[in-house]
Image (cartoon, rainbow, N blue to C red):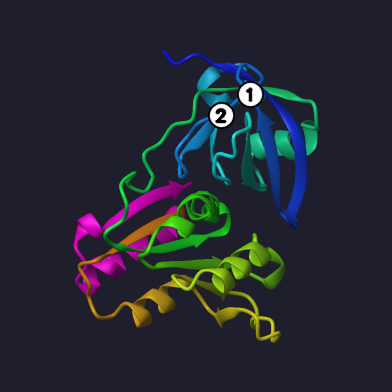
């Protein structure tokens, strides 16, 4: 059985009206190593039953040589785990965690395919970590397609826009389902859902693309079905489900 380890919440930042970042420190080591795309499972003080206390959250930043990692977490209306984190936890609070886990990662070798990242909400977290680590050293193209409801729900907007300006092999597209996109000219944005973007822009089937999908299960399931219908092979579609 994997051993649980103590983690300390060192910083909390509000990212959007319903999303916060929590920086966890593992004081049992000097450096926290993991592969971007992996997650941490927390044991939260919300139940007497062990498995009812466990919640997994994707790590939102690449390893930086410290013993800390950022978790980007949305508050769920009836979620006991997020109710504790948003109302009961504070800087200095401790929780239990396991070693980073998960296989929703890029190959460690240099990529020989382009990557299309399709996500909603906090499903952007593992992609942010991947891009921080790999974008500067890869020659192939990356396209991040991010969906949310309103402009104030756009997570890490300034960071991704800066990446798009700095790296010619990176595109960043936002889809807003509840309002028109901001008219500031700095953002490639659409009114609607992520599905219309990849359907239009990747209609010509290409064997040299991999689609990474992360977010609410309904979106991921629909995107997978659409891509298969468009003619893409199942091996080109990699999934991570949130709820």
- The numbered mark at residue 9 is none
Image height of 176 relative to 94, above or below: below
Q: Does the magenta run of residues contain 228? A: yes
Query: Where in the figure is residue 222, as x and y percent of width and height?
Result: 36, 64
In the picture of the structure, the residue carrying the numbered disc 1 is 26
Q: Which SS type dominates the magenta stretch?
A: helix
Question: In which quadrant is the N terminus drawn?
Answer: top left
The reply to whether the C-beta atoms of the residues labelled 2 and 1 are less than 8 Å apart is yes
> Which residue is at a point 32% across and 46% down the rendered structure image?
107
> Which residue is at a point 55% across and 71% down the rendered structure image?
164
Q: Secondary structure at mark 2?
A: loop
Query: Where in the figure is residue 80, as x and y percent of width and height?
Result: 65, 35
Magenta highlight range: 216-243
Query: Where in the figure is residue 187, as x and y percent of width and height?
Result: 61, 79
In the picture of the structure, the residue carrying the numbered disc 2 is 32
> Which residue is at a point 69% across and 45% down the rendered structure image?
21
| Circle nearer the viewer, 2 or 1 | 2
Query: Where in the figure is residue 168, as x and y percent of width and height?
Result: 48, 73
Q: Does the magenta run of residues contain 63? A: no
């Amino acid at each position: 059985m994997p051993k649980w380890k103590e983690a300390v919440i060192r910083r909390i930042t509000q990212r959007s009206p319903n999303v916060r970042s929590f920086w966890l420190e593992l004081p049992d080591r000097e450096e926290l190593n993991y592969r971007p795309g992996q997650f941490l499972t927390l044991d939260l003080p919300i139940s007497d039953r062990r498995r009812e206390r466990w919640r997994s959250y994707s790590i939102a930043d690449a390893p930086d040589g410290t013993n800390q990692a950022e978790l980007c977490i949305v508050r769920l209306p009836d979620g006991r785990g997020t109710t504790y984190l948003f109302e009961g936890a504070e800087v200095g609070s401790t929780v239990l965690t396991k070693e980073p886990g998960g296989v929703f990662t890029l190959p460690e070798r240099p990529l020989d395919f382009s990557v299309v990242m399709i996500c909603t909400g906090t499903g952007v977290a593992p992609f942010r970590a991947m891009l921080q680590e790999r974008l500067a050293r890869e020659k192939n193209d990356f396209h991040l397609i991010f969906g949310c409801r309103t402009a104030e729900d756009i997570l890490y907007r300034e960071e991704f826009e800066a990446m798009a300006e700095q790296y010619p092999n990176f595109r960043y597209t936002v889809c807003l389902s509840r309002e028109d996109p901001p008219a500031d000219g700095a953002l490639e944005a659409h009114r609607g859902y992520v599905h219309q973007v990849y359907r239009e822009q990747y209609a010509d089937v290409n064997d040299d693309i991999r689609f990474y999908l992360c977010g609410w299960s309904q979106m991921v399931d629909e995107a997978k079905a659409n891509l298969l219908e468009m003619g893409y092979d199942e091996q080109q579609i990699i999934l991570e489900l949130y709820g």
